[in-house]
């Protein structure tokens, strides 16, 4: 933006902008700046040249302005602008003659921009403070700093809906043609089509005409009949699907009804659309939306910290059948195994607990599940209790916590119950019917083997570890009567003789690694400082690394540097020297037989790396990619689809744009959870959500970004706890929330004082944030749909890819309010009052439409 020292010359700048690239510029510049110092003239000229520089930045104002945003195309680039921004953009084009930095700055700083409005309001409040002189200079400096930090994050995030994409069986064409609509026998009026497909269309009608969903009409394609002899005298029957108002008109979506004597109208439309789809634009809305959402799904699902446990129902009994694993949750599956490596999930997730959760309010199908293990005579016994069960046995609550939390195995889980159906396992591509055999293969429903395996799945139990060392210490500090220890057996779980098998399937994510690995066995010789070389064999390779297997245990450890030789591969190349290659040991298996190694390549000329790059490029079709072979092929994708259609989690995404990090995309699942509803009440529309309470004091750039910079993709998530004081009945979002992160409290006593104060006067919400570093986007998962978009609008595909590549972090926010209330050792009455107030509030919130 133009700096403050040039604001005084804004009128001069405005008059000179249209002349910057004309012959008249120098003459007009001298006349308008004759009375200014040479230094000022120089600054003005440099500013004009800066503003006139060509710009390629993509502008997306969705959720950032007080106006209806729609796509706006300019020279192959699609921006998302409202009417004010479009007028500003077009005015800038008249001034500069092309898209420039000046236009970008003007469009992103219109008066209806939420950030600009907030800054104006802040400046006004600041001026009021200064004029009244009620604050000392030091306090004012601190306040200004906090305000500026908040301004940076005061914006609404775009809200996407997981699995919220539709499947279209045929292509739609953006095609405007004159038609006539027959409502009744004598009521006929002209209209135009907006888009057209074989089985439906969208039409534009005047606001004076009333149409409603379910209404049947007849369409006469008068515009087509001027060129083609359709021979249809009574019109084509359609049924209204829905009606929406826009641009001083109604847009009506219609579904075509069957007609016995249509005389080949369907075939005519099919040939007409196919023959003209290069001439007119194919409507890509639903495919573009699907690629957009699926891209974000594939960032989130492989990073989930929760363990989804799928339960089948037979003869009225629910039993865990399978789990969906990721790198982040696999350790939880092992936690729920005893000394025999047998699962204890069937004992923990019994019917009584499921019914207890499902009986709760729609937004509260969850509880807190506490567990610990006790070893006796070489056997491992599990103990567990929900928060409700501990309330029922109030005399045992301090005993359970005091005794259990003293053990390293003590955990607190958020246990949430979701409903699912086997039909949700199949999500076809959002593409029209195609003769492409690969697309037809991808659109196949689960195999009979998988369909039979999942046919009885009805519930998903999410188990999220929300315990921390600090919270465990609070439970451990609770005093209890040791004489009551024997009574804890009411929470114990006996050993089952017949354990039902629980299958494990992982979320498939092909691009988690920086590059693909390929299976190949060849001799690898490892050099030792003393003694002969060790012979090993490669298991797989990439250009940057190897996995090798040794015949005997080795003494190497992670971080060791080792020289290797590849004698068999050396026989096929004279161009590259494949001996004495420097590698670093990245991981060693427990039995010391398998090692992962990567190249040491400080000068970017590692012979092994270059050799493997060429080997892969020249033989990709012959090489076999290294992938895990699941016991039930196809089970992972089926469970992934069922989970994504049922989850109610709060996910957010951090994008890197230059040096700045932005949290501007949030996802919602099948239904909004408590945090979605809490924030949505301050949002302007259903497609955006304010993030201000979670982004206090520029949390994105001061905390999230700094943490992400230190993390690698394969690292476990970093967690935060955030505590919100909600004050009902306030006029603004700033007045409604007080936000405290765990790092805001230097002492536990300060945190306890804050929680006690909120519980006594207002409403407490507490959340745990799991922040993960992402890798590159999984473009293979969306390859076919992205390719379809590229065929007809390559600029849209590029914009979408750029957005996905800018994602550097994904966050998962889990409600831990009930657990915080329990760990704070509040009375049963206080906890019940908070829970009732929370339920009442959430039930009263009307989500924006």
Image (tube, rainbow, N blue to C red):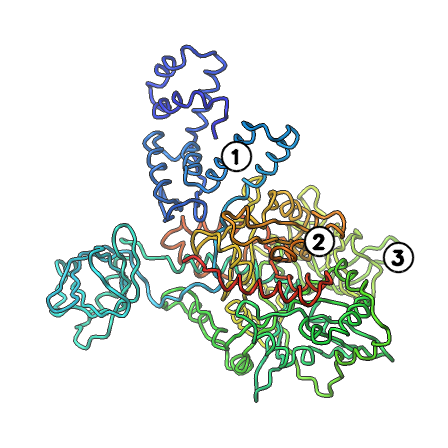
Point out the tag, 2 or 3, that comes first from the N-terminus: 3
Q: Residues within 10 Å of mark 1 (few under 14, many from 20)?
A: few
- In the picture, the quarter occupied by the C terminus is bottom left
Q: Nearer the viewer, mark 1 or mark 2?
A: 1
Q: Is residue 597 left or right of residue 20?
A: right
Residue 329 x %, y %? 66, 65
Residue 837 x %, y %? 57, 63
Q: Nearer the viewer, mark 1 or mark 3?
A: 1
Instruction: Please name the residue shown 58% across and 74% down the image.
Output: 460
Asked which quadrant contains residue 397, the reply is bottom right
Q: Is residue 727 visible?
A: yes
Give residue 598's mark: 2
Instruction: Please name the residue shown 55% across and 61% down the image.
Output: 674
Please say if 738 is above or below 185: above
Residue 364 x %, y %? 57, 68
Residue 79 x %, y %? 40, 45
Asked which quadrant contains residue 524, the reply is bottom right
Would you say the residues marked 2 and 3 are in contact, meaning their CB atoms lie under 8 Å apart? no
Residue, disc 3: 531
Point out the tag, 1 or 3, that comes first from the N-terminus: 1
Residue, disc 1: 125
Q: Residues within 10 Å of mark 2 (few under 14, many from 20)?
A: many
Point out the tag, 1 or 2, that comes first from the N-terminus: 1
Q: Is residue 207 left or right of residue 415?
A: left
Secondary-structure class at tag 3: loop
Front residue (pair 568, 72)? 72
Please say if 125 is above or below 836: above
Q: Is residue 199 left or right of residue 355?
A: left
Q: Residues within 10 Å of mark 3 (few under 14, many from 20)?
A: few
Secondary-structure class at tag 2: strand
Total labels: the figure holds 3
């Amino acid at each position: 933006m133009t700096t403050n020292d040039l604001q005084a010359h804004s009128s001069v700048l405005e008059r000179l902008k249209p002349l910057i690239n004309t012959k008249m510029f120098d003459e007009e510049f001298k006349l308008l700046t004759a009375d200014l110092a040479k230094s000022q003239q120089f600054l003005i000229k440099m500013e004009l040249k800066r503003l006139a520089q060509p710009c390629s930045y993509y502008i997306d104002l969705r959720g950032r302005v007080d106006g209806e945003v729609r796509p706006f195309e300019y020279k192959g680039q699609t921006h998302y602008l409202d009417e004010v921004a479009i007028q500003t953009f077009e005015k800038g084009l008249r001034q500069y003659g092309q898209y420039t930095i000046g236009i970008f700055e003007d469009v992103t700083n219109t008066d209806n921009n939420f950030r600009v409005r907030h800054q104006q309001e802040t400046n006004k409040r600041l001026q009021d403070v200064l004029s009244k002189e009620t604050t000392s200079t030091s306090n004012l400096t601190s306040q200004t700093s906090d305000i500026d930090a908040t301004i940076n994050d005061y914006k609404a995030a775009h809200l996407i809906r997981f699995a919220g994409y539709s499947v279209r069986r045929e292509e739609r064409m953006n095609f405007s043609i004159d038609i006539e609509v027959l409502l009744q026998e004598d009521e006929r009026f002209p209209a135009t089509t907006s888009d057209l497909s074989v089985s439906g269309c969208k039409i534009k009608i005047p606001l004076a005409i009333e149409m409603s969903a379910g209404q049947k009409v007849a369409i006469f394609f008068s515009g087509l009949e001027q060129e083609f002899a359709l021979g249809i005298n009574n019109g084509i029957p359609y049924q209204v699907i829905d009606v929406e108002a826009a641009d001083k008109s109604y847009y009506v979506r219609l579904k075509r009804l069957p007609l016995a004597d249509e005389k080949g109208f369907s075939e005519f439309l099919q040939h007409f659309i196919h023959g003209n789809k290069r001439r007119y634009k194919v409507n890509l809305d639903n495919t573009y939306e699907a690629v957009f959402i699926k891209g974000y799904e594939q960032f989130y699902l492989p990073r989930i910290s929760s363990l989804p446990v799928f339960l089948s129902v037979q003869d009225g009994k629910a039993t865990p059948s399978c789990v969906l694993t990721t790198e982040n949750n696999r350790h939880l599956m092992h936690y729920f195994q005893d000394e025999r490596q047998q699962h204890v999930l069937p004992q923990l997730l019994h019917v009584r607990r499921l019914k207890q959760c499902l009986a709760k309010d729609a937004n509260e199908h969850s509880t807190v599940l506490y567990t610990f293990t006790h070893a006796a005579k070489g056997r491992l016994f599990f103990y567990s209790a929900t928060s409700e069960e501990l309330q029922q046995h109030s005399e045992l609550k301090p005993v359970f916590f005091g005794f259990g939390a003293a053990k390293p195995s003590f955990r607190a889980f958020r246990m949430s119950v979701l409903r699912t159906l086997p039909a949700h396992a199949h999500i076809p591509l959002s593409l029209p019917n195609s003769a492409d055999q690969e697309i037809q293969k991808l659109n196949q429903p689960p195999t009979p083997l998988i369909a039979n395996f999942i046919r009885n799945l009805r519930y998903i139990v999410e188990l999220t570890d929300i315990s921390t060392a600090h919270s465990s210490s609070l439970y451990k500090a609770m005093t209890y009567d040791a004489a009551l220890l024997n009574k804890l057996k009411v929470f114990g779980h006996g050993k089952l003789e017949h354990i039902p098998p629980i299958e494990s399937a992982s979320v498939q994510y092909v691009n988690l690694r920086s590059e693909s690995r390929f299976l190949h066995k060849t001799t690898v010789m490892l050099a030792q400082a003393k003694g002969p070389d060790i012979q090993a064999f490669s298991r797989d390779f990439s250009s940057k690394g190897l996995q090798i297997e040794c015949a005997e245990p080795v003494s190497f450890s992670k971080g060791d540097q080792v020289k290797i030789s590849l004698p068999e591969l050396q026989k096929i190349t004279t161009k590259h020297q494949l001996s004495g290659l420097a590698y670093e040991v990245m991981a060693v298996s427990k039995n010391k037989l398998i090692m992962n190694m990567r190249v040491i390549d400080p000068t970017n000329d590692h012979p092994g790396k270059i050799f493997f790059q060429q080997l892969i490029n020249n033989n990709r079709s012959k090489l076999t990619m290294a992938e895990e072979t699941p016991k039930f092929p196809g089970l992972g994708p089926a469970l992934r689809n069922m989970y994504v259609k049922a989850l109610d989690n709060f996910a957010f995404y951090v994008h890197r744009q230059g040096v700045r990090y932005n949290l501007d995309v949030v996802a919602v699942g099948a239904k909004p959870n408590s945090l979605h509803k809490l924030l949505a009440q301050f949002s302007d529309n259903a497609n955006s959500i304010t993030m201000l309470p979670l982004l206090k004091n520029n949390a994105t750039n001061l905390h999230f970004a700094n943490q992400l910079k230190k993390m690698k993709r394969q690292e476990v998530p970093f967690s935060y706890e955030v505590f919100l004081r909600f004050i009902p009945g306030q006029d603004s979002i700033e007045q409604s929330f007080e936000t405290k992160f765990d790092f805001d409290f230097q002492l536990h006593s300060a945190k306890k004082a804050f929680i006690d104060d909120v519980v006594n006067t207002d409403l407490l919400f507490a959340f745990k944030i799991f922040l993960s570093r992402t890798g590159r986007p999984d473009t293979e998962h969306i390859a076919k749909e992205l390719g379809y978009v590229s065929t007809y609008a390559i600029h849209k595909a590029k914009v979408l890819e750029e957005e996905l590549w800018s994602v550097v972090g994904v966050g998962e926010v889990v409600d831990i309010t009930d657990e915080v209330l329990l760990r704070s050792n509040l009375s049963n009455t206080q906890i019940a009052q908070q829970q009732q107030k929370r339920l009442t509030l959430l039930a009263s919130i009307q989500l924006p439409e």
